[in-house]
Image: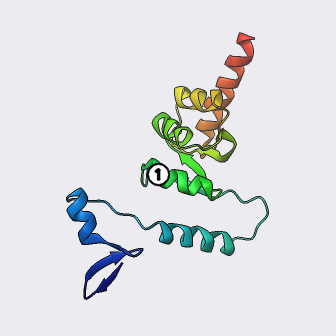
Amino acid sequence: MIKTKKGYFLDGISLEELAKEHETPLFVVSKSQILNRVKRMKESFSYPNTLFLYANKANRLISIQKLLIKEGIGIQAGSIGEIYLGLESGCIPKKMRTTQNGQDEEFLKFASDKQIKPYLDSFEDLDRLNFLIEKQENLK
């Protein structure tokens, strides 16, 4: 944001004009700042096959997620709703990961049905996943 004699501007757009047009409170995000941070992040990690993930619980605006997905960023989802949101934003399952403490069977099954890989952070999560796999194998 830049303050000039004519007011406050973000990406060359007058915030006062936006407030008049859309009323307040108003949530404004800088596309250029997002893109600059993505570029800086990618330049900072030069490991091959690195998948950067956006935790969509941080901001659920589909327009932001679509922008990030277009830049090659994946989605980190911690709930069934966040999986839906990531998919609705255009993220392919290959670029999504689940992260939820104490992932229950319903969540793991839903993610599995959508072909989304889970990140497991406990042996209990691993046990639940193994149980789910065994259960699905027995249904075949």
State the residue at coordinates (66%, 24%): 131
State the residue at coordinates (39%, 64%): 29
Does any portion of residue 119 appear in the rendered image?
A: no
Tell me, what colour scheme is on the image?
rainbow
Above or below residue 97? Residue 110 is above
Does any portion of residue 90 appear in the rendered image?
A: yes
In this picture, residue 23 sits left or right of residue 9: left
| Location of residue 69 in the rendering, given as x and y in whole percent from the top left corner | 59, 52
State the residue at coordinates (53%, 36%): 103
Q: Residue furthest top?
A: 139
Identified by mark 1, the residue type is: Ser
Q: Residue furthest right?
A: 48
In this picture, residue 60 sits left or right of residue 112: left
Q: Using the rendered view, name the quadrant where residue 6 is placed.
A: bottom left
Q: How many marks?
A: 1
Above or below residue 31? Residue 22 is above
Above or below residue 52? Residue 116 is above
Q: Using the rendered view, name the quadrant where residue 86 is placed.
A: top right
Mark 1, residues whose alpha carbon is within 10 Å: few (<14), some, or many (≥20)?
few
Q: On the image, numbered disc 1 is attached to which residue?
A: 63
Q: Nearest the camera: 1 or 120?
A: 1
Considering the numbered disc 1 on the image, is that residue within a helix, a strand or a loop? Answer: helix
State the quadrant of the N terminus. bottom left
| Location of residue 75 in the rendering, given as x and y in whole percent from the top left corner | 57, 49
| Location of residue 31 in the rendering, given as x and y in whole percent from the top left corner | 47, 66
State the quadrant of the C terminus. top right
In this picture, residue 17 sits left or right of residue 94: left
Q: Using the rendered view, name the quadrant where residue 30 is placed.
A: bottom left
Q: Nearest the camera: 110 or 22?
A: 22
